[in-house]
Image: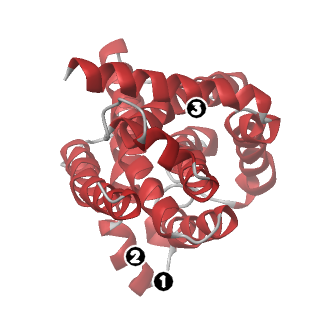
Amino acid sequence: MRRLISDTLVIAERNLIRLPRAPELLLAFTVQPIMFLLLFRYVFGGAITTPGLPYVQFLIPGIIVQNIAFGGFVTALGLNEDLHKGLIDRFRSLPMARPAVLAGRTFSDVVTNSLSVAILLVTGVIIGFSFNSDVLHVIAGILLLLLFGYAFSWVFAFVGLIASTPESANSVAFIAIFPLTFISSAFVPVASMPAPLQDFARINPFTITVNAMRALWLGLPAGNYVWGAVAWAVGITVVFAPLAVSRYRKHTGS
């Protein structure tokens, strides 16, 4: 266990050190989230009605959940690239814990997701967002975000291991997840959608997680949203972590 933790931290450090050397990836955690937030706030915000809440209050939890879910795309790209460049084979020749490669990848996503959350919250406060709950609920919301993002890191890890190229890994993940973020309560009230989409949106993990964030940060009725969001995050991890590990073993023969 000590070796696994040590090797996981080494792999995570490697992934994080690479980011400044690839500015286009670093932009995805800094500039891109701000761009999306400002576009929705000032371009679409005036056309969307959100009864009971100013749009900026409605928007911030939704756009942060969307952004956190896509935080693992670097894992998909990195794993796929490492597989096809032979780096994984090099790791196999080293005296290291085999699960450390995947564990380090997903753990580094927690760090980059934390950076994205901080940037979006600061930007949100600047443009008018404010919390309407106590500090403990705010912290609980941030931890829930990181848990949700960690779950989707395993989804991206699996996609990266089954895709043929880094470009296809990015495309497959985008096509699979992007529609889920829009058929949810992230950007518009579910009641404004056609009836068939409403039925899907209500059980969508993005809707449940966004509503949980609004309950924790804005003091809205929580219902079962918080526990539902935790259950979705744990369930996604339980499904996709073994799938990713199985696919990794198939590639490495271990």
Which of the 4 image quarters holds residue 14?
top right
Mark 2 vs 3: CB contact within 8 A: no
Viewer-proximal residue, 250 or 217? 250
Q: Name the residue under label 1.
A: 194
| Res. 210 mark | none
- Mark 3 lies on a secondary structure that is helix
| Alpha-carbon span between mark 1 and mark 2 | 6 Å
Q: Mark 3 points at which residue?
A: 15
- Mark 1 lies on a secondary structure that is loop
Tell me the residue at 51%/65% (across/down).
177
Q: Can residue 227 be seen in this view?
A: yes
| Alpha-carbon span between mark 1 and mark 3 | 43 Å
Q: In this view, does 59 lie to the left or right of 35?
A: left
Mark 1 vs 2: CB contact within 8 A: yes
Q: Where is residue 146 in the image (x, y as percent from the top left)?
A: 40, 34
Nearer the viewer's eye, disc 2 or disc 3?
3
Viewer-proximal residue, 229 or 109? 109
- Point out the tag, 2 or 3, that comes first from the N-terminus: 3
Look at label 1 and name its amino acid. Pro
- Mark 2 lies on a secondary structure that is helix
Q: How crowded is mark 1: few (under 14 residues within 10 Å), some or many (20 or more)?
A: few
- Point out the tag, 1 or 3, that comes first from the N-terminus: 3
Viewer-proximal residue, 199 or 118? 118
Look at label 2 and name its amino acid. Gln
Q: Name the residue under label 2.
A: 198
The answer to whether residue 12 is above or below residue 253 is above
Viewer-proximal residue, 70 or 210? 70
Which of the 4 image quarters holds residue 150?
top left
